[in-house]
Image: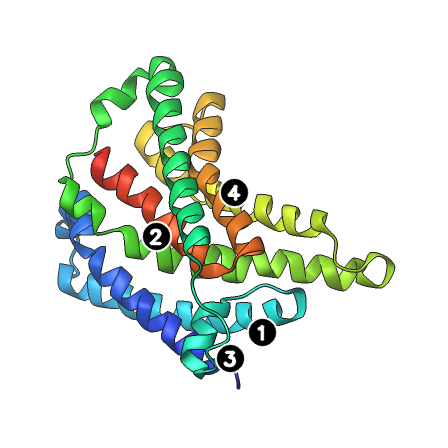
Amino acid sequence: MKHVKLAIFLAILCVIGLLCGVPYMIATIGDTLAGTKVPVATVIIASVVQGAILAFVLGWLGLMMGEAVGLGAPILRSWILKTGEVGFQKRDVWQAIILGGIGALVVIGLELFVFRPLIPELVSMDSKVSPLVGMLTFLQGGVYEEVQLRLFLMTLIVWVLSRVFRKQQGLKPWMYWTGILGAALLFGIAHFPAVQQLFGEITPILFARTIILNGLIGLLCGYLYWKKGLEYAMIAHAVGDIILHGLYA
């Protein structure tokens, strides 16, 4: 039960993030939602409620597994439990900001100079979302996706590997790198249905674009989660989203 308070707090942060992402949802798929028989408000409420429940369950499981493999959210835990043992370090915050920014700039560079020349259809698919609406997604990505991808999924991979190999090897760096790569790869794969819907088929170059562009910042966030804690992964992800969905849009 000691992880419940923090899991509830993370779920609340996720709800705030999801609500901040509502304008982006309406701007990108509002026409599709309007064409269904279900009222848009009902879809949004259901999405937020479902997200809150999912965030709590995955966060709780991630915190329990993370305790066994040295992963978690030490700063938030210190705040929630009022131990005062851990706080943000200025140097680490700047490292997370810089890594998030570098990751976003690399993604933009790859999109502009590698993938667009190879996929002409991308030019006509430029986002029509305003920069402000795009920036509002930073909490949804920085909190909700990090709870799912790092706190739960990456931790799960590391925990399973530790259970299988720990007696022979103990906790090894390759287990964490496998978790980092696995979570980033699965996040990219999760975008395949949307790519299929947009382009009609997934060609090798679309496959590469989907995995690379969606997974790159995930690698950096995974590294920060491992070395610094979930909070720094959240910062890096949020910075990346501000640049990619706000400034770049």
Front residue (pair 140, 95):
95
In the picture, measured across the screen, residue 124 lies left or right of residue 52, that is: left
Q: Visible in this render: residue 46?
A: yes
Label 3 to label 4: alpha-carbon separation:
26 Å
Residue located beneath label 1 in the image: 64
Label 4 to label 2: alpha-carbon separation:
15 Å
Q: Are marks 3 and 2 in contact (CB under 8 Å)?
A: no
Q: Are marks 4 and 2 in contact (CB under 8 Å)?
A: no
The amino acid type, in three-letter code, at marker 4 is Leu
The residue positioned 58% from the left and 43% from the top of the image is 181
The amino acid type, in three-letter code, at marker 3 is His
Label 3 to label 2: alpha-carbon separation:
22 Å
Tell me the tag on residue 219.
4
Q: Visible in this render: residue 50?
A: no
Q: Which sits earlier in the primary sequence, circle 3 or circle 2?
A: 3
Q: Secondary structure at mark 1?
A: helix
Q: Which sits earlier in the primary sequence, circle 2 or circle 1?
A: 1
Residue at the extreme front of the image, as rendered:
90
Q: Which sits earlier in the primary sequence, circle 4 or circle 2?
A: 2
Quadrant location of residue 163?
A: bottom right
Front residue (pair 76, 95):
95
Q: Which sits earlier in the primary sequence, circle 4 or circle 1?
A: 1
Residue located beneath label 3 in the image: 3
The amino acid type, in three-letter code, at marker 1 is Met
Q: Which sits earlier in the primary sequence, circle 3 or circle 4?
A: 3
Residue located beneath label 2 in the image: 141
Front residue (pair 249, 71):
71
Label 3 to label 1: alpha-carbon separation:
7 Å
Label 2: how many Cα within 10 Å (few below 14, some 14–19, many 20+): many
